[in-house]
Every structure is written in structure tokens, then in C-alpha cells.
């Protein structure tokens, strides 16, 4: 199993969280705790999934829980750069339709910045 690695950066009106490695039931609580700790109220959250190699239903639950929390703050969760099996899971479950999804993290950031200034 590829170890889970989490990093983030705060930009105006958003928190960008990069997830690398694998997320499953053994470490999804670590992801949930991390998101809760670094997410600022009313910030949009962009999950950079470019280096995510595996995602199971427990990790998907974390993403969707974050989306519910963000919605309570009039913010959104955006998914960026998913590929391979994580992208397939997002597609099969319909999450890629429910949450804004982008080919690149840069595109997600630009979209959030544009919506905040309009």
C-alpha cells in the first residue's frame, strides 16, 4: 500500500488539499481529521487528486462529508486531476457529476477565484 501523504495550501477563499497515495478504511479517519483541522470556515475546498492512487468507499465518504460541511458554509468541494481507479470510482458512483470536477488543479483554482470575484 502506498502511504498516505497530505499537504495543503490556503489561497484566497479556498483550501487546496493534495492527497497522495492510497485512502482506505485504515487511514480515511486521518484524512477526515486533516480536512477538519485545516479547512477554514466559508472556504471552498479543492481536493488535488493527481497523486491519489487508490480510493475506497471510506475515502469517498470523507469527500462527501466535507461537501456537506462546505454546503452549510455556502462553499463547495471541487475535485481535481483524478485519474486511474479513483477517477473510475468517482464516475461509477456519480460523485463526478454531483461535485465540480476538473482535469487540473490549476483549472479548479481559477474557477473558484473567478466565481468569488463575480
Image (cartoon, rainbow, N blue to C red):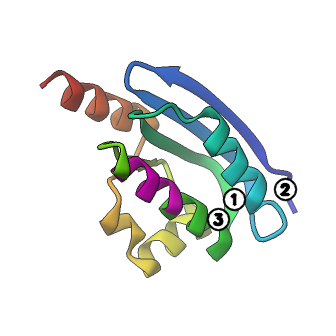
Percent x, y of residue 92: 45, 80
Percent x, y of residue 25: 78, 71
Q: Are marks 2 and 1 in contact (CB under 8 Å)?
A: yes
Residue 68, magenta (yes or no):
yes
Question: What residue do we see at 77% from left, 43% from top?
Answer: 5
Main SS, magenta residues = helix
How far separated are the C-alphas under marks 2 and 1? Answer: 8 Å
Which residue of the protein is positioned furthest toward the left in this rendering? Answer: 118
Q: How crowded is mark 2: few (under 14 residues within 10 Å), some or many (20 or more)?
A: few
Quadrant containing the N terminus in the rendered view: bottom right
- In the image, which disc is placed on residue 59? 3
Q: Which residue lies under the disc numbered 2?
A: 2
Nearest to N terminus: mark 3 or mark 1: 1
Q: Is residue 52 visible?
A: yes
Question: Which of these two is toward me, 73 or 87?
Answer: 73
Q: How many labels does the image show?
A: 3
Nearest to N terminus: mark 2 or mark 1: 2
Question: Which of these two is toward me, 46 or 83?
Answer: 46
Question: Which of these two is toward me, 51 or 7?
Answer: 7
Q: In this view, does 29 lie to the left or right of 50?
A: right
Residue range corresponding to the magenta coloring: 65-71
Nearer the viewer's eye, disc 3 or disc 1? 3
Percent x, y of residue 52: 66, 53
Q: Which residue lies under the disc numbered 1?
A: 53
Amino acid at each position: 500500500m502506498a502511504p498516505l501523504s497530505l499537504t495543503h495550501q490556503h489561497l484566497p477563499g479556498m483550501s487546496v488539499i493534495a492527497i497522495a497515495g492510497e485512502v482506505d478504511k485504515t487511514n480515511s479517519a486521518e484524512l477526515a481529521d486533516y480536512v477538519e483541522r485545516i479547512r477554514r470556515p466559508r472556504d471552498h475546498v479543492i481536493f488535488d487528486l493527481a497523486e491519489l492512487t487508490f480510493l475506497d468507499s471510506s475515502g469517498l465518504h470523507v469527500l462527501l462529508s466535507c461537501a456537506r460541511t462546505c454546503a452549510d458554509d455556502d462553499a463547495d468541494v471541487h475535485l481535481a486531476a483524478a485519474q486511474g481507479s479513483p477517477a473510475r470510482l468517482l464516475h461509477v458512483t456519480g460523485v463526478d457529476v454531483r461535485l465540480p470536477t476538473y482535469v487540473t488543479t490549476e483549472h479548479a483554482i481559477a474557477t473558484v477565484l473567478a466565481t468569488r470575484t463575480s
